[in-house]
Amino acid sequence: MAVLTIKPKTKRSKRFLDHRAPKLLENSKNAMIMKGGNTSETVTQALKDIYSLKKPNVVLYKKKNIMRPFEDSTSLEFFSKKTDCSLFLFGSHNKKRPNNLVFGKNSSSSYLRPLFFSKITDTLLVQHPYLTVFFLLVDFFRGPVVPAVRLAGLEHILHFTAADGKIFMRSYRVLLKKSGCRTPRIELEEIGPSFDFVLRRTHLASDDLYKTAHKQPKGLKPKKKKNISHDTFGTKFGRLHMQKQNLDKLQTRKMKGLRKRRGAVVVENGETTSPKKIKTQE
């Protein structure tokens, strides 16, 4: 399949294409939120609450969009490419699947293909592995990557718990209380929104597409350091390669006790004496 290459004609279009071009360190992932042809008041309020949590990396479509993500993802791919959003949330409501939310992610390619879709609602419990849902929720709600976090700047926490076949989402505000020492005492106050999800239906990508989407660039792979090893406790060991040394010629600290003494000197009359005594006699 031939890939169409678009050459920019202006500086503005060049900056636009450079912003969307693949990078070693990608930008923060954007998400788009849209509702289907039929929605309930519960679904509409849930979409608004998630939109407020995801700001500013989110696009909200207020008009109704008649589509079925599991049967045909063409419309989702078009909107994802148009808004440069790799994540999406689709809300709908009908008699068969009431209060329905669809979380999804697309791979970054010329034609965006669905990586995996997770249909999460509050009814019709079906047992599924939650590892894929865990990665999807973390990818959807995560913020920008920062080198360090100040304790006073930690104000909001999203907590996900999987128990009894459900996924519980809770939102807490961090309160810093006096503790009598330098480190404050931390308390959590639930502020909402809160959701009780049940995994209903999933549509996973193929193994080849999954491996391609998670392929790590060579520039980000850590370089292997030679002659360095670690033991089971994490202690770092290094190996040095040196030439064979002659210890007899090794320069050490000069001390009187380590000096070599000269042998006895024989004088003309046959007596032996030390070199120092010879110097004094002269």
Image (spheres, grey):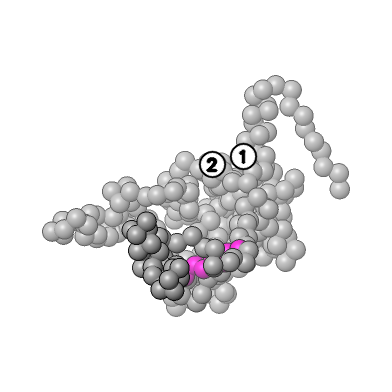
Taking 282 as reference, is 129 above or below it? below
Q: Earlier in the sequence, mark 1 or mark 2?
A: 2
- Provide residue 56's location: percent of width, then percent of height: 47, 41
Residue 265 visible at all: no
| Left or right: 172 in relation to 18 | left
- Residue at the far front: name it: 269
- Residue at the far top: name it: 10
Q: Nearer the viewer, residue 265 or 242?
A: 265
- Identified by mark 1, the residue type is Thr
Contact (CB < 8 A) between labels 1 and 2? yes
Taking 204 as reference, is 108 above or below it? above
Q: Main secondary structure of the magenta part?
A: loop
Helix, strand or loop at disc 2? strand
Dot 2, crowdedness within 10 Å: few (<14), some or many (≥20)?
Answer: some
Residue wearing tag 2: 59
Residue wearing tag 1: 83
The residue segment tinted magenta is 235-242
Q: Is residue 241 magenta?
A: yes
Number of numbered callouts drawn: 2
Q: Nearer the viewer, residue 250 or 120?
A: 250
| Left or right: 146 in relation to 128 | left
- Provide residue 123's location: percent of width, then percent of height: 50, 70
| Separation (CA) of disc 1 from disc 2 | 8 Å
- Residue at the far right: name it: 1
Q: Is residue 212 magenta?
A: no
Q: Quadrant where the C terminus lies?
A: bottom left
Q: Residue at x 77, y 32 (%)?
A: 6
